[in-house]
Image: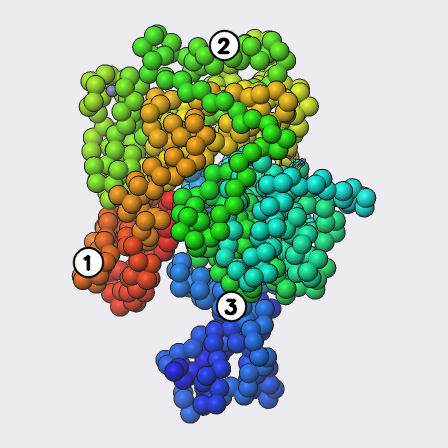
Amino acid sequence: MSRYANIIVDISMEKLDKTFQYRIPDKLKEELAVGTQVIVPFGSRTLTGYVLELTDICEFEPSKMKEILAVAEKGMPLEGQLIALARWMRRTYGGTMNQALKTVLPVRKKVQEKTRKRLVRRISLEDAREYLELFERKHQTARFRLLAALMDTPELDYRLVSEQLHLSAATVKKLEEMGILRIETAMVFRNPVRPSGTESHPFCLNVSQQAVVDSIWKRVQAEDLRPSLLYGVTGSGKTAVYLELIAGALERGKEAIVLIPEIALTFQTALRFYKRFGDLVSIMNSRLSAGERYDQFERARRGEVRVMIGPRSALFTPFQKLGIIVIDEEHEASYKSETAPRYHARETAVRRAQMTGAFVVMGSATPSVESYEKALNGTYCLYKLEQRIHGRPLPAVEVVDLRRELKEGNRSILSIRLKELMEDRLNKGQQIMLFLNRRGYAGFVSCRACGHVLKCPHCDVSLSLHMGGRMVCHYCGYEEQANRECPSCGSPYIGAFRAGTQQVAEIVGREFPGAGILRMDMDTTKNKDGHEKILEAFSEGRADILVGTQMIVKGHDFPNVTLVGVLAADLSLYTGDYRASERTFQLLTQAAGRAGRGREEGIAVVQTYTPDHYGIEAAAAQDYGMFFERELSYRQLMEYPPAAHLLAVYLTHTDKDGLERGADRLKELLLKQADGRKVSIIGPADAYVAKINDIYRKVVYLKSREMEELLFMKEETELFCREDTVIGQLNIQFDMDPMNGF
Ligand code: ADP
Ligand code: ZN
Ligand code: ZN
């Protein structure tokens, strides 16, 4: 039983890190938990506060320490729940309690936000790595430094950038023009749409949709609050199911949170929610400043808003009577935070729902392996929508073997079959999407004659090609020199695969001189609304062909698109991490799902050097079950999540030798600690980007089938940091079951 409690007395203050320690009187020992609201003496007043921590470590002169007077409110008030959630996040995902609190409780900022400019990264970490490598190659050191800083922290204060990184306005401007960042000043939030009142006639759900809704309500009534996983093929009407469930929750006097990945949160999607729920809806996006987010949350707290839609941070909306949390596209990597605490919004949502008696409904056409496994073993409840709305067929998928094209002398990036179909569609006045799933930073190395890919012998992930022809495994640190010929067939056609959307657009333009071509990627969407404008133009038929990166595959309905071409499916297959096959399957399925949404049937053509890879075979067969089984057995064999848990420990230091010494020392201590435990330790290895802004970066991985074992090792590592002088020099961050790399 702990003797002292660390208490936070005012959570709307600018600083959350100010805690005060109080003695726990015997009569309250049973009643206190993290999050309990208490009454404490404070100077000459009495205040209410929240318990942040129960401890036996006394931080003040015990004789001067005051006692907690009473428990303020029975049960757990909302703030208390969020504090308890923060506590769980800190324990599971690492970081400090203060970082966790700031994540769940928006802090009112006193700074003059209106005059503050911020730089905000617009691109994913993976894409950023690619640019970073480009800048390094071209010796553009100022750009390199700025982007590197943005990779560390997705948002930077403008003044800080100019004063501490000594970067000129021209450098910032250049990266803005390239679409890598945007410059922001605080803006006033308002709802994007004024609903006109009478548009709220929903269509009737079909039989399968209704069955899902009924079954979920039946379970909720029986107090079976297990999370539901809605596995529904693209265009099967999942959103309509969410809307119906939310409506039901509102009728019961409850509130709803809807998580949607930022990239899929388009105007179209927002409109559907506004049309149904009018002014009860509010939408958050990552462009809101801390103060604006605070205002949004205040409206929710007061009950003015009852449906909050947004990316992962919307999860912490302070609803008093939360009834349902919807997670759309639950497989998306953007649900994993890239800063400490590196929490997963799905797991955290499940936790929050448990604490509040709400239920979670998550949906996807390509569920994550983690969630599907939970659905099969009964932790979640599985629901399926296997048909598209109006009985529309799923598109046919054809696989083209690019090795054969090469053998037959076709070196174009367009296969003969794809060209033929494109011509046909253009003649019929139908539209085409060409998709380049460009991914990853330091490209993988493969043979274009036989499809062989160079992999780490220990980790079964692809090796990444680095400067100077080194090939590196980012899990265990294994290295070898790049080959000049294929170790499998001896062909000289071995190397890293690179092609950009611009080249593709040019080539297509030469092949089809009459066709209207639009390109959508980081470059063409750099202007405000550039993204929406391109989609609008394409949707209005002002172009025949849309060429783009993964940006184009998410959540858009183009009824006139009858052909989707995936130019090189392999690009996302070998990104050097264990989730590569899963991501490829997801991208291919989503891409194919773009075809044939209207009355005409659709075809997807998938070009690849490895047609017999199960990720590609399963996507072609549109067979999620087959993919899941193969993928799960790979994860089991290699002990990757969900078969085991993986805790990444990211190490950084300004001094290369210091980092190496610290990493080795950490490994040594971890090995000692792991003795007799069910934990294995891998690495240290260089991070994907081994150096940013003169800071060196390494990773150590810990693997175990037991999450608790890893949590124990994490706490031990935190101890080493405090007690060991060599390790103490390093900056250490944890990432449980990482998704975004480092
Ligand atoms: P998903 O989210 O599974 O991709 P959506 O919910 O977006 O699918 O539904 C696809 C399309 O079908 C949307 O245009 C939607 O308005 C329409 N739709 C959904 N359910 C029905 C229904 N029961 N009757 C008619 N149209 C529907
Ligand atoms: Zn070969
Ligand atoms: Zn390895």
Say what amino acid the circle numbered 3 marks.
Answer: Ile
Specify the quadrant of the image occupied by residue 497. Answer: top left
Does label 2 or label 3 sit earlier along the sequence? Answer: 3
Q: Which residue is mark 2?
A: 420
Instruction: Please name the residue that numbered disc 1 is placed on.
Output: 671
Whole-percent x, y for residue 496 in the image: 32, 25
Callout in the foreground (2, 1): 2
SS for dot 3: helix
- Farthest residue toward the bottom? 63
Question: Is 368 rendered above or below residue 431?
Answer: below
The amino acid beneath tag 2 is Glu
The residue closer to the viewer here, 598 or 500, is 598
Give x and y (percent) for residue 11: 57, 70
Q: Nearer the viewer, residue 209 or 395?
A: 209
Report which quarter residue 406 is drawn in.
top left
Q: Which amino acid, by three-letter code, is at mark 1?
A: Leu
The location of residue 541, given as percent across then percent down, is: 66, 20
At 44% from the left and 74% from the top, the residue drawn is 53
Q: Where is the N terminus found, in terms of image quarters? A: bottom left
Q: Residues within 10 Å of mark 1 (few under 14, many from 20)?
A: some
N-term-proximal mark, 2 vs 1: 2
Q: Residue at x 56, y 61 (%)?
A: 222
Residues tagged 3 and 1 counted as in contact (Cβ below 8 A): no
- Total numbered labels placed on residues in the image: 3
Other-residue count near label 2 (Cα within 10 Å), few / some / many at <14 / 14–19 / ≥20 = few
Circle 1 sits in a helix, a strand or a loop, which is it? helix
Q: Is residue 93 above or below residue 697?
A: below
Q: Quadrant of the C terminus?
A: top left
What is the CA distance from the residue labelled 2 to the residue labelled 3?
60 Å
Say whether disc 3 or disc 1 marks the residue closer to the N-terminus: 3
Instruction: Quickly name the residue at label 3.
Output: 83
